[in-house]
Image: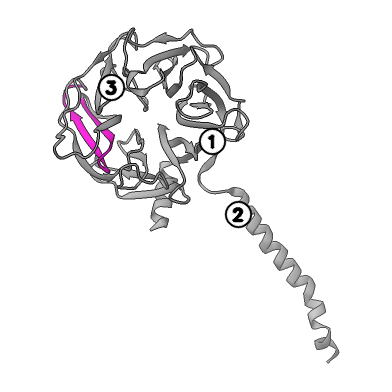
Amino acid sequence: MTVLKYLPVLLLPVFSYLFVMQQEKKITAEASGPPFETGFFFEQDKFFKECHASTIVHLKSGQLMAAWFGGVKEGTDDVAIWLTKGTPGNWSTPVKVAKIREDAHWNPVLFQSPQGRIFLFFKVGKKIPSWETWFITSDDDGKTWTAPKELVAGDKGGRGPVKNKPIMLSNGTWVAGASHEEGQWDAFADLSTDNGKTWTASSYIKLDRTALKGKGVIQPTLWESAPGKVHMLLRSSDGAIYRSDSEDGARTWSAAYKFGLPNPNSGIDLTRLPDGTLVMAYNPDTANWGSRSPLSLIISFDNGKTWPKILDIATGDKKDEFSYPAVISYGNTIAVAYTWKRKNVAYWIGTKEALLKAAKDRK
């Protein structure tokens, strides 16, 4: 009886030990973290009131570089282009890298040439229909930059990349997804065969405007599936992503057609992995000017015909905004930068394998 009386007391250290071990295992598991790296590029509210339209590039040094526009509000004269570089959790203090005059700056796009030169394209103008495309370059991973220069002197309306990164084709041609927003919306491809010195614009992508609702299509994202075979997906005002294809190295294009994936008139972007897998970021809403929440990743293994896997990487209320993704890949790693409620720029980084597992687990 005496032993039974004191049994709870005698067993207390054992229970305590088991509890502590269980908690340590839990903490260890939590410390190992999820299979993705996520976070923000800067401290909110410290540099500007609003920000939007980010871009990202993987440097040859192994660091990442990101840029966006920031100021009082999109379109105000104080808006400039800001930039940071580093690694997850260790980003440099953002700097104002481009401000050529007191007009709004818009939609920076980072691109790295095969030689390692960094191009930063951006738009300047009080209104989108008449903005100009400017660029600066760096040969030392962003430590110093050239003076700003117009991409196509005298152009109004937007030559070169409008939102998403250019791609380099198998023959060395650079192709930028471009668009023009004056009255109706039209998209086209801008090509350079001399490493960005000069550019030649394709014709506008044909559209059946009797069937398409709203203004049209803009902001192409591009990939090459085989030599000379180039494809683009487009943001639209019709509640769906549109697609166009080229058989001659992006010089001419098929008429754009509704693609079956939703689009709430918000930016999209994709990347092609070395094995041909496509990974795209988008907002899965079908309403024109609909919700920009959640922001999701989808995957295609058949050159964009079907997209069987999906993972939400930013979620919230329907009124929240997680938008304008920029998507790149290096090896089997995917990196996404995106607008977080217009107050910050967030990132998501993960491997293809981790993404596939998470998408499977989500079902």
**Magenta includes 261?**
no
Q: Residues within 10 Å of mark 3 (few under 14, many from 20)?
A: some
Q: Please state the horizontal and vertical placement of residue 43, each as a whole percent of the image.
A: 62, 34
Seen from this angle, which residue lies furthest right?
Answer: 2
Q: Which residue is mark 2?
A: 29
User: Distance of mark 3 from mark 2, alpha carbons?
Assistant: 43 Å
Disc nearer the start of the sequence (1/2): 2
Residue 220 left/right relative to 9: left
Relative depth, front residue between 227 and 124 = 124
Residue type for callout 1: Asn
Q: Residues within 10 Å of mark 1 (few under 14, many from 20)?
A: many
User: Distance of mark 1 from mark 3, alpha carbons?
Assistant: 33 Å
On residue 169, which mark appears? 3
Q: Is residue 254 above or below residue 201?
A: below
Residue sitting at 46 percent across and 12 percent down?
Answer: 137
Query: Which residues lie in the magenta part?
Result: 229-249
State the SS at label 3: loop
Residue type for callout 3: Leu
Q: Which residue is mark 1?
A: 344
Residue 37 left/right relative to 238: right
Residue 11 left/right relative to 308: right
Classified by dominant secondary structure, the portion drawn in magenta counts as strand
**Quadrant into which the C terminus falls:** bottom left
Disc nearer the start of the sequence (3/2): 2
Q: Which marked residue is nearer to the observer: mark 1 or mark 2?
A: 1
